[in-house]
Amino acid sequence: MQDSEFRYLQEFLLRKIGLSLSDDKKYLIKSRASRLLREHNLSDVNALAREIRKNENGTLAHQLLDLMTTNETLFFRDQYPFDALRDLIFPELTHAKGRHGKIRIWSAASSTGQEACSIAMTASESVPEPSRVHILGTDFSAKAVEYAKAGNYSQMEVQRGLPIKQLVRFFNQEGNRWLVRPELKEMMTFDHANLVEDSLAGKVRRHGPFDVVFCRNVLIYFTPEERTKVIDRIARCMHKGGYFISGATETPEGRFSRWEQVLYKNKRLWKLL
Ligand SMILES: C[S@@+](CC[C@H](N)C(=O)[O-])C[C@H]1O[C@@H](n2cnc3c(N)ncnc32)[C@H](O)[C@@H]1O
């Protein structure tokens, strides 16, 4: 790939989805875009870059952005956030809101939905009236959002992190697929949202303000500057005192928002001040 075209795609990915690709990642664009070249009859990645330049909001551009996202996820990833919900956060919110107030949770990079499902299962098992828990899952990847909406997982996917007890309680088996049961599905809404767009708050407003935000394993893809902006955007969508749950190694550092660290079993959670 020519350096000029690589530089353009690097800048395009950074501007559109905050993806910060280092100079040694040419191969990543080449390997992820290979399907697109065939599909759109393009000779090589240079031709792809030229087409995208002509129409940055077209289908081809969107397809490339979607392909460049990393959607790796699993049920009950890291376990401690879901234990913290059960032992600390849900009891605190139930007490603060009384028995009937709504509890709003946002999975802010929900990928194919396993994180939102894990939150819903935890709520079903530990909140007296789980129907008052509303979970919004959003992601940039349209493909991931559609998958999450369908709630239809393979054997391999449910074997990643989902205990058998929850599998039989919350999923129906159809052939070799596992379908999320309606009572769990009703607690979740999935939609497309881009964390690096200033319109983010408007996009999720009708589902918030949120008591808890999960934003895990996505901040690592952004530059430090973009990370700060994303944190501030998310903070604007939360209640004061709301919990922010990041990936195990990620820290919310906003320019305007302030966070207090809360330790749960030696793991860090964050509260919006
Ligand atoms: C590695 S997955 C993490 C999924 C889940 N939070 C977890 O921890 O298992 C990262 C997700 O972030 C999404 N993502 C990347 N950039 C994004 C952006 N600018 N806005 C919204 N979602 C984004 C990707 O599409 C991907 O599904």
Image (cartoon, rainbow, N blue to C red):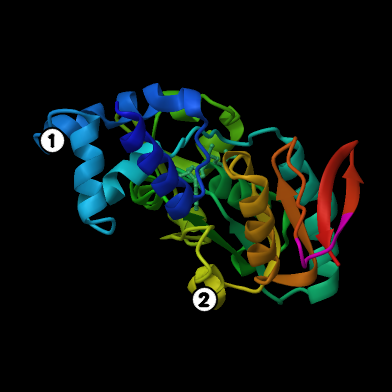
Mark number, residue 202: 2
Q: Residue at x 57, y 35 (%)?
A: 75
- Residue type, numbered disc 1: Glu
- 217 vs 149, left or right, is right
Mark number, residue 39: 1
Residue 187 percent location from the top left of the image: 53, 61
Write the start and end of the magenta stretch as one range: 255-260
Q: Is residue 155 visible?
A: no
Q: Is residue 253 above or below residue 80?
A: below
Question: Does 80 appear in magenta?
Answer: no
Q: Residue at x 36, y 41 (%)?
A: 9
- 165 vs 231, left or right, is left
Mark 1 or mark 2, which is nearer the start of the sequence?
A: 1
Q: Residue at x 73, y 49 (%)?
A: 245
Bin the neighbour count of mark 1 within 10 Å (Cα to Cα): few under 14, some 14-19, many 20 and up.
few
Residue 6 percent location from the top left of the image: 36, 34
Residue 97 percent location from the top left of the image: 79, 75
Bin the neighbour count of mark 2 within 10 Å (Cα to Cα): few under 14, some 14-19, many 20 and up.
few
Q: Secondary structure at mark 2?
A: helix
Disc 2/disc 1 C-alpha distance (Å): 35 Å
The one of 217 and 190 positioned closer to us in this rendering: 217
The one of 226 and 191 positioned closer to us in this rendering: 226
Which quadrant of the rendered structure holds the N terminus? top left
Q: Which residue extends farthest left? A: 41
Q: Is residue 204 above or below residue 156?
A: below
Which SS type dominates the magenta stretch? loop
- 252 vs 138, left or right, is right
Residue 273 percent location from the top left of the image: 86, 67
